Image (cartoon, rainbow, N blue to C red):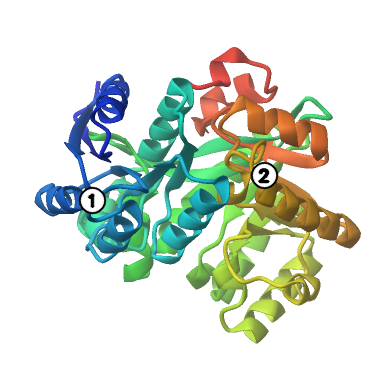
Amino acid sequence: MTNQPPRQILLAEDSSSQRNLLKALCQQIPNTIVHEAADGSWAFELSRRIPRLDLVITDLNMPGMDGIELVEQLSRQPHIPSLLLISGHAPELLSNSVRAAQELGFTGIGQLAKPIDDDRFLTEVTRLLDIPQDISDNKSSLPLIDIITGLAHNQFCAFYQPIYDLRQGQAVQIEALARWRHPTQGILGPNQFIGMLEHEGFISLLTHRIVQTSLDLLTRGYNMQDLRLSINLSRRLLDDKEFLDWLVDQVESRGLAFDRIVLEITETMAFTNFGHTLATLLRLRMRGFELSLDDFGTGHTTLEHIKNLPLTELKFDRILIKDIHKDGRSQSIIAGMANIARELGLRMVAEGIDNADDLDFLTEQHPDIALQGFLLCRPVPAEELSKHIYPGCQSSRRA
């Protein structure tokens, strides 16, 4: 049992019966406090009184201040929480609302169409409470001295989330995700430390540790499976030649093939100072590293951009994957993107596989897209990873 403070949920829904039902579902999740409001105006007032909100759940269509205006107001707050949008409107309106929230700066976003399925609601709320909220918000970080002390005492580690190729029936790749085993607060996610380390220029200290322990894991425990390892690179590290040279040495010294290491960059990183970025990526690719464009479909990438980058993988963002089984527009977008990726010889990964219907749709319609998400396996510590190489394990579903 940890001393982590309760997660704060704000629920905005004008229907009292719907609000009571959703509140009761939220209260099934341990260590949570649920605040409720019948309209956007009262919800926003509550948000200003709660020191730190973890998740806002809001209906789009409410009297007075509607859900869209509430989202706009929340985006101007010092701390941006995770967000779950619910609506009985057409799926296109809900999807476009998610995109608007993303443009306003929300990073942890989910959507659910009414009528609400209880199990899917609980799965989505749990996911949103467990992921980083706004890693660029340094106010959400613990003090720098505490973070540096934690690094000095080896309190930071990598958790791993598998990426599955269901044609092979097993994981083909694992993504390394930083976690802090805090001595009093339990396991902390990146929102508690990444933003501060980036801002203060210490992100390489953390990344060095994640890289070393993850490469050791490949060398000692998973060499025979030929798993690829995904490592997220920050803008600062992509610009740091000394770090990139160090990374090359780390891979070579362990005798690992470079094509087992996938370096993930975001769309924003890829097209900031494009000439320099392209030159860096070309050098990495010539070394043999695999290169993945993360969160693909959420920015302004064009076919010309993709053609000009030495990529080996596209990672479709969860915004496009969520409820794809019933969202015709998302289906068309993914079909078009997948065809382009196939023409260019790029591997594909869909992240955010959180319900069985989306899993079934992608497996049937796009079997060559590898899958990653909470339904298949949450991020797990290294000592538990071997139990999740095969996705059929029941313990990996909605833990």
Q: Position of residue 362 (x, y in %)?
A: 74, 36
User: Is residue 165 visible to us here?
Assistant: no
Q: CA distance from mark 2 to mark 1?
A: 33 Å
Q: Amino acid at mark 1?
A: Gly
Question: Which of the 4 image quarters holds residue 326?
Answer: top right
User: For this rendering, which residue is in front, 185 or 61?
Assistant: 61
Q: Which residue is mark 1?
A: 40
Local crowd at mark 2 within 10 Å, few (<14), some, or many (≥20)? many
Placement of the N terminus among the 4 image quadrants: top left
- Which residue lies at the image location 55% right of the left edge and 15% below the top edge? 395
Q: Position of residue 257 (x, y in %)?
A: 78, 50
Q: Nearer the viewer, mark 2 or mark 1?
A: 1
Q: Is residue 278 above or below residue 298?
A: below
Q: Position of residue 323 (x, y in %)?
A: 59, 38
Q: Is residue 84 left or right of residue 233?
A: left
Question: Which of the 4 image quarters holds residue 314?
Answer: bottom right
Q: Is residue 56 above or below residue 135?
A: above
Q: Is residue 344 left or right of residue 247?
A: right
User: For this rendering, which residue is in front, 340 or 146?
Assistant: 340
Q: Is residue 113 above or below residue 284?
A: above
User: Is residue 321 visible to us here?
Assistant: yes
Q: Amino acid at mark 2?
A: Ala
Q: Which residue is mark 2?
A: 350
Q: Is residue 243 above or below residue 324?
A: below
Local crowd at mark 1 within 10 Å, few (<14), some, or many (≥20)? many
Label 1 sits on a secondary structure element that is helix
- Which residue lies at the image location 19% right of the left edge and 36% below the top edge? 36
Q: Position of residue 366 (x, y in %)?
A: 81, 40
Q: Is residue 12 left or right of residue 327?
A: left
**Which is more N-terminal, label 1 or label 2?**
1
User: For this rendering, which residue is in front, 331 or 212?
Assistant: 331
